Amino acid sequence: MLLQALTDYAHRYLAEELKDAAWTMKRVHWQIKISLQGDFLGVVDRTAVAATVERKNQDFLLMSIARSPVNRSNGEHPLLGTDEISYVLGVGPWTGNKFVDRSRAQKHHAAFVNLVGRAALDTGEPALASCARFYAKLEEVEKARDAARKARAGALVAFDIDGPLVERESVREYWRKLYSDVLAARTDGVRGECMVSGKSGPIASPHPRIQGLSNLGGQASGVALVSFEHEAFCSYGWRQNQNCPVSPDRAFAYVLALNDLLKHENGRRKDIAGHAFLYWLTNTSKLDLLGLLDGADPKEVRALLSYDPRKDCDPNRFCMVAVSGNGGRMRLNYWVEIGLSEVKSNLQDWFSQLRLEYPKLGRYEPRPVQLWQLLRALDRNGEPDHPVVLALLRRSIEGLPLGYAVLSQALRQLRRFATGDPKATSADKKAYPMSLGRLRASLGLIRLCMNDLLRQKGEVPCISEGLNQACTLPAYVWGRLMAEYEYLQLVSSTIEYSSSIVNRYFALASDHPALAFPKIEILAQRHLRILHRNSRTTAELMDVRLQNLRRLLTFLDSTASSGVLSLEEQGFFALGYYHQKARWRTEEPRERRDKAAGSVFRDEPRHQEFR
């Protein structure tokens, strides 16, 4: 259950904040220093101080501030000691010019001054009395407004009277009591059984707001995961969140957990395809699984590939939820809780199936395929639809097989690479679109899809990382032949063509080989004659290689080649093309190949990554 997992997260990782729910930590940008007599002493721009202490030192700005027990988007709800500048100083340069904005700022300021006065009388705290005297001296308040004129709207401002006001225990205790009284009043005396803890007691209504989804469709004031606005969502006469009974402490815990997970700086959130993927482990661990998918660190992947669940059974559990905003509500799109050992085994299979034969650069292995490369292999901008992204993540985390939808999209994008994307950037047009570095992610994904489809049919996954010369599938042989024709053009040409055989015929050949290869054969005979004049030995070698593949096709039942290739056959064609190309790139020394080809490989660096 999601709410239970979130409350467990809060108790494990945010125990200190749960102990004192009335207070939280936020970045405070300004401090107003006043004397015990209430005289203004100056302001401190804490942002500028943080910049001098250490560049972008955000931790320096953190300060304890009061937590609001209500949603502050409507009405006047001041916080004690530290609040937004419109509450602390009222109307100023940070206020808009509209009458509504200035009127709202005046009301906020009056409510803040009233709260400070009441707190000073109830607690007898000298520092609060100093703040009350400060507000009684209008000329001192004007000095503070002028000194803080560079502050922006919404900036947090704290009082400092020989130290931060909010650090005095009497101030903190006063706010705790006020906070608990307001929460108790909001329950309306309704009691029930909490669906998270199973205990009977007060029921929270409504739940606190969740922050951090304004860039994904949510309101800046916050969103709600549990909410009941219309009568159609209510039953048995219950109102609002009584239809989902959760105790106030559990409601606060799960909201606290979501707010923490939604913070980018905490490293447990990744935004992909308009959704925020939040992930964590039930027990403390340094392992970052989505970071491993996205970054594919070679050392971590190597360790993962050698993982044996029988020897190292990890009891930890992995949780992930995909959320987005929809106005004032949080939209939940995916949720999973799974054993970490199972996740490691699934990731092990994920990286194994994505591997393809690739030329080494000395003793260095090519970097494992990263998640962003797969996204680019499915969409030119690296932003495929959310169901496709979710399918990839579920394949890597849960081991759920991919289907025809992902295979079709990968093949369609591959054909765009071959023919040339009219919307490509100048850098993309300059680089060879069908280089091995650019194909590795696309074909690795195609291999993964094909083996998954074989598994779903009850067959053993048989598509290898490298060239399989024993494979007699016509589509696979057609793909190998396409790679040989491309190589023939490269070694026979001393000039650079505006378009290659692959650019002109790959898309057609991968779909209708019977239509494409007769045209390609005519061009191949021309290239053979040119190569025969330049290098007779190389021409005879190439002719033998082509004849062997043609002879193999004549002995096969090539019914698929006479019509349209199926989706799986198109996958075999693409893999045959890549495997054959990778084999001659691996076997032949680069220096000899470059010399024979007249350096036509200058646009295809040995380890050019798909970016």
Image: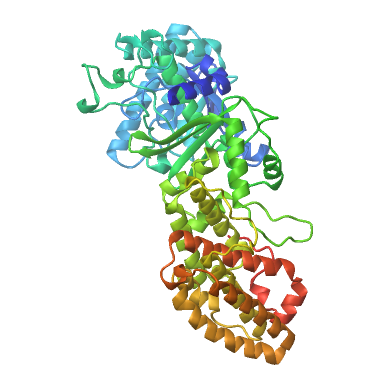
Q: Position of residue 18 (x, y in %)?
A: 51, 17
Classify 555 as above or below 377. below
Report the quarter where the N terminus lies: top left
Q: Pinpoint residue 135: horizontal percent, then vertical percent.
A: 43, 21
- 289 vs 524: above or below: above
Of residues 220 and 326, which is closer to you in this image? 326
**Relative to 577, does residue 149 appear above or below in the rendering?**
above
Specify whether 282 is left or right of 218: right
Instruction: Say which quarter of the image contains residue 396.
Output: top right
What residue is at 39 percent from the left and 24 percent from the top? Answer: 208
Inspect this view and state whether residue 558 appears.
Answer: yes
Q: Kindly indicate the quadrant of the structure image that contains residue 83.
A: top left
Q: Is residue 579 left or right of residue 119?
A: right
Q: Residue at x 58, y 76 (%)?
A: 550
Q: Which quadrant, please, contains the C terminus?
A: bottom right
Question: Is 423 positioned to the left or the right of 585 in the image?
Answer: left
Q: Nearer the viewer, residue 414 or 547?
A: 547
Q: Depth check: 13 or 158 in front?
A: 13
